[in-house]
Image (cartoon, rainbow, N blue to C red):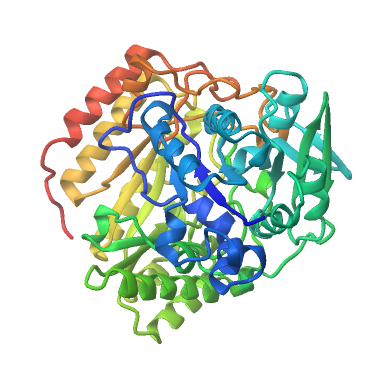
Amino acid sequence: MALRVVAVAPPELPASGLGRHTLTSADPASLFNACRVAGQRAANGTGAWGDSNWAGGRASRRESVLLMHSLVEDMARFDALLERFEPNLLLLGAMSVCLPGAVACAVRAKQRLGDRVHVVLGGRHASETIWQAGGTVRHHPGSPVRLIADGTLPPVFDLVVAGPGEHVIAGLGEVIATATQPATSADLAAGIADEPGDWIASWADGDLPRAVTSRRPTFSRDQLPSPAEIFGVGASFDVFGGRLTGHVFSDTGNGCVFDCDFCSERRSVTGGLVDLGNGADRLVRQLRAVSDVVAADAPGRGASAFIEDSTILGGSPREITRLVDLLDRTDLDIRFGGQFTIDQILSRTDLIKGLTEVGMDYVFIGVETLDPGGIGGMSKDRRPDGAAWMSRTEQAIDQLTQLGVQTGAAVLFGLGEPHRDRLALLRQLSDWRDRYGGPWPVSLNWATQHPLRGSDGGTGYRYSEWSVPAGEWAEAFDDFGEATTRYPLSGCAPPVLAEVQEIRATFHALYERPSGGGAR
């Protein structure tokens, strides 16, 4: 049968939209990454993908990919995709806070299409709730497979895939297209067993979880195509002055070089960096792809890119030096930004300056909190000279400003800090904006406990309920990125509505006024 595919990033909210200050992108970058090998086969006319609805150009592939934020507001768009394409493969990529949204989408697909559609769930939630330890597949209490097996969730996921999905997704399409009747979960898992990558494919067989693990855990990251080349570029970050903005990666791993307890990208859970020695070369290829795609698809718009590494190339001096050298020898008209920690900025001044000379004019930093000591510390707080966190943060912003680099910042509440510190941190950021012109934008977040393959402080959350309910809570959190009322960090109290409302009002009062401008 012909392969018909729809890929969806499910919503994190049951109802209501995003606030005007929420940092978001029009492109579902993680979903594009996971689907890029399948998309490459479609573009090259290879196998079942070459005869699928993805076999057209970038624009047509994007038509069957959907990024959702609110179930109520976005469900009509999802229904339209089901009606138009009648997919026999529905791919859902979910974070933990999106699990209820993924269930709702899967239920709707099964109601409309029955056994004709194979629903496959992947993404960070699957990878944090299903893992191997000592050669045994383990399931967190929030594992979708475990929740189906115990009757908490309906049996709407035919397969749940943990780990890298690039080759798995491509293989699933081939299995479905060659089946003479709808494939069972066991058929799907058996059919992808030889696809490369350190993945686990799991499903519920009645009340028992089953799993198949990859026979080929390694693959070449150098052979992965650019997501921009496969799906195009549709986002445009304000900081890049109207240029279209692609998401680019060095493909050096799933996590960070640091190990902060609250972070879902902590090294002890996601593993260390992989094949860092070729990271700069891969990154330049992706930057070039963004530049070429924008020039071809939207001439005159100009290209920009945000490097999605936890910190650019892990902060490696050798790889950053190579990145600068490679970009210096190209003629790419592209502006780009990325993330560094405060102490990486202060300890790598010359490297940062070199990056600005080849197109970097935006750096996003994680401020998180007023005083790391007050929340038990952060792994990335290296304290090279003993200076206080806020002093070093201001020094980093000042240094970037002098280099002509705009700074954005992430704030993370709910780490155990007193409420007065939250308001004081917002006032401090506003004062710096008056003095330096940044940080702006500022991303507000409320710390959410992630499953972390069981390293979750014993919380054992099941994530089957919405993280933020509709109504007054959703309104209070509408300028936040990730947030929760139900899944606070281990040992931390859940948010208080009046306090969140005060944060929102203070944020608006401080940031919806002209800044002092600062030096640029």
* Quadrant into which the C terminus falls: bottom left
Q: How many marks?
A: 0
Measured from the top left, where is residue 4 in percent x and y?
57, 52
* Quadrant into which the N terminus falls: bottom right
Q: Nearer the viewer, residue 239 or 351?
A: 239
> Given the current orientation, which residue lies at the most extreme right position?
135
The structure residue drawn at horizontal position 55% and vertical position 26%, both measured from the top left corner, is: 100
State whether residue 183 appears in this view. yes
State whether residue 384 appears in this view. no
Q: Is residue 202 above or below residue 57?
A: above
Q: Is residue 102 above or below residue 469?
A: below
Query: Left of 385 or right of it: where is 52?
Result: right
Q: Nearer the viewer, residue 512 or 519?
A: 512
Query: Left of 515 or right of it: where is 178?
Result: right
Measured from the top left, where is residue 337 in percent x and y?
36, 61
Q: Nearer the viewer, residue 54 or 273?
A: 54
Measured from the top left, where is residue 217 in percent x and y?
79, 59
Query: Left of 67 or right of it: where is 101?
Result: right
Asked where in the image residue 45 lies, by quadrant, the reply is bottom right
Query: Left of 90 or right of it: where is 159?
Result: right
The structure residue drawn at horizontal position 24% and vertical position 63%, both measured from the top left corner, is: 402
Measured from the top left, where is residue 101 in percent x and y?
52, 30
Asked where in the image residue 459 lies, by quadrant, the reply is top right
The structure residue drawn at horizontal position 62% and vertical position 46%, both measured from the top left corner, is: 88
The structure residue drawn at horizontal position 25% and vertical position 73%, both measured from the top left corner, is: 299
